Image: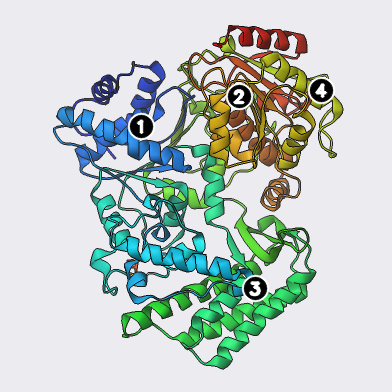
Amino acid sequence: MTGSPSDLPSVRELLSHAVDAVGGTEREGQVRMADAVDNAIRTGEHLAVQAGTGTGKSLAYLVPAIRHAVESDTTVVVSTATIALQRQLVDRDLPRLARSLKKPLGVEPTFAILKGRRNYLCLHRVHTGVEDEPEDTALFDQFAISRIGREVKRLHEWSSDTETGDRDELVPGVSDQAWRQVSVTAKECLGAGRCPVGDDCFAELARAEAGRANIVVTNHALLAIDALQDYQVLPDHDVTIIDEAHELVDRVTSAATADLSPAMVTAATRRCARLIDADIVDRLLETGEGLALMLEDALPGRLDVLPDALGGAVASVRDAAHACLTALGSERREDPEEAAKRKLARSALDDVHDTAVRLLDAFDDDPADRKDVVWVTGDRQGGSPRPPALHVAPLGVGGLLRERVFGTSTTVLTSATLALGGSFDTLARQWGLPPQPQRTENSAGSTGSAGSTGTATEKPPPSDSDTGPRWSGIDVGSPFDYRRNGILYVAKHLPPPGRDGLGGATLDEIAELIDAAGGRTLGLFSSMRAAKQATEELRDRIGHPLLCQGDDSTSLLVNKFAEDARTCLFGTLSLWQGVDVPGASLSLVIVDRLPFPRPDDPVASARQRAVEARGGNGFLTVAATHAALLLAQGVGRLHRSTDDRGVVAVLDPRLATARYGGFLRASLPPLWPTHRPDVVRDALRRLDAAAPA
Ligand code: SF4
């Protein structure tokens, strides 16, 4: 893309206008980021921007994106990982920006939100009443079946009131089982051309609106589906902005993961019953039963070798699903209800068949060349048994992103955490971008390798590609004075965390820290088991209210925690990234252990092995990267506004003593470091004394 002279005001002028309109103040990092995004759009060179909390990064990318979209009469796609950010953009930032930029741009910029087809009510299904049988009637009691029936009835009534058909606008919501009765996936959709209500279709209307909008807000899953599928999901666009980019690889991996279970095979047989010869359907049903038998004997976990018997069962499922597909025949002229039934059947059969093929292919190559990892889940024990299933996920998504995202539009990736160990290279490799340390610009504005530790390993880990799209990285810093307002305390004197839960010394340390802080503590634990153990052992001991994730809905618990400064909240993964509590309610963040993936995590362990097979250090490249991203997110819970002060206490001494500790520390905001418990407790006591009553 080349820049062209334009009568429109510059990005800086527009940004200043927008900041004035929302009553903010100009921030240096925000201006630098807006300039960098504008430059990326003009040159077509991809950009990674690390922008700390408080930078105002959404304005910094939205303003140049809107300017470009208006100038070129085109669409810019903005993708987020979380619904919270999606809502913030669509409900708050974009309406205010659109109003404030109308005058200087001479036209009010437009925006739209686009979700996957399954999120919209399908009018054709509502009108024709084509229902899915419950997946496994035996799993639903009569009460559940009548509840689903009531919900479906409500959805039918809602279908004539709603203007968008968007599930998120239905309050109160309904169960997934009920929603599935009135929605379709993209594969199940008849296509607007064939569908008798295609002109009124909510999903089609949303797509059309998105096609006309300057800015389309979507999520990483839909971005991944757009990249994975042969059909186009997103409107034509030449610029993609990926916010919360630290989540991109995980979200794309999830979207590219496929499952195969006996229940899915059974559901496919139900869908094609009465459409094709009963013998052919029965054959598929039998292969599903055969698969269930084989999975009974399979232990949960990663499969490095496909046992012959299990492989035979999967191959039988593949062949039987193929026979059903052949019997179903190609699409033909038929009444819409019949067409919808066939479409549902075909989609379920395709899923079963294609996943079986992929599962079998995953074991074909030399282990070093494998593209996918396969694992078994299932739990026949305990109070809530999970039926067994096979899963297949990609070992890497860099090739896909390079070809289908970076290869098709100028892409800006941004987050508060992208420069791991001070360098963008670790994540860039996962995204399929070549390493480019010489071109990386750090927060001081200089060029060159941005960090002292570079990647997690001494030598660069193997990359999907050492050549590829041009990109640059920039860290615009944060307006927060982390060193002045925060302490990183690593409890070096504690023993390293063991396998048998939290030790006595660690629990004592937690109690003493909370006591010094006067409550005000967010405990981020690496497992639910540890969070519960700490809650049980400390609830009667600390003299402050203590909430644990799972006691109630997480949002309710976070609200209670924010409202009462003395209250403490303990929990696990979603709290690491999802808590936004500025002020004196949160002065202490405790991390019990470094958040490495579990050793039995099938995807992480297979990725580690793949790196090792190519000569790299798997543990450091995969596990340390994972831990660095999550730890930085956890540490980021402390400072949510410029006035926030406090302590992050990491009770895992490996952050100070292990070889990879430097890489992890260099991935965190620059808090003032100490190992001294007395210094930290004094600081917490002073903060408690100074906090508003
Ligand atoms: S076009 Fe597809 S999603 Fe829309 S109403 Fe028809 S079948 Fe449903």
C-beta proximity under 8 Å, tags 2 and 4 = no
Q: Which residue is mark 1?
A: 61
Mark 3 surroundings within 10 Å by alpha-carbon count, few (fewer than 14), some (14 through 19), many (20 or more): many
Q: Alpha carbon of mark 3 to alpha carbon of mark 4: how far?
A: 48 Å
Q: Is residue 293 above or below residue 168?
A: below
**Three-letter amino acid code at the position of disc 3:** Pro
Quarter holding residue 240: top left
Q: Is residue 15 visible?
A: yes
Q: Which residue is mark 2?
A: 668
Quick one: 257 or 615, which is closer to the camera? Answer: 257
Give left or right: position of 409 versus 197. right
Q: Which residue is mark 3?
A: 262
Mark 2 surroundings within 10 Å by alpha-carbon count, few (fewer than 14), some (14 through 19), many (20 or more): many
Image quadrant where one finds the C terminus? top right
- Of mark 3 and mark 4, the one earlier in the sequence is 3
Q: Secondary structure at mark 1?
A: helix
Task: Report whether the residue tagged 2 is closer than 8 Å to ligand 1.
Answer: no
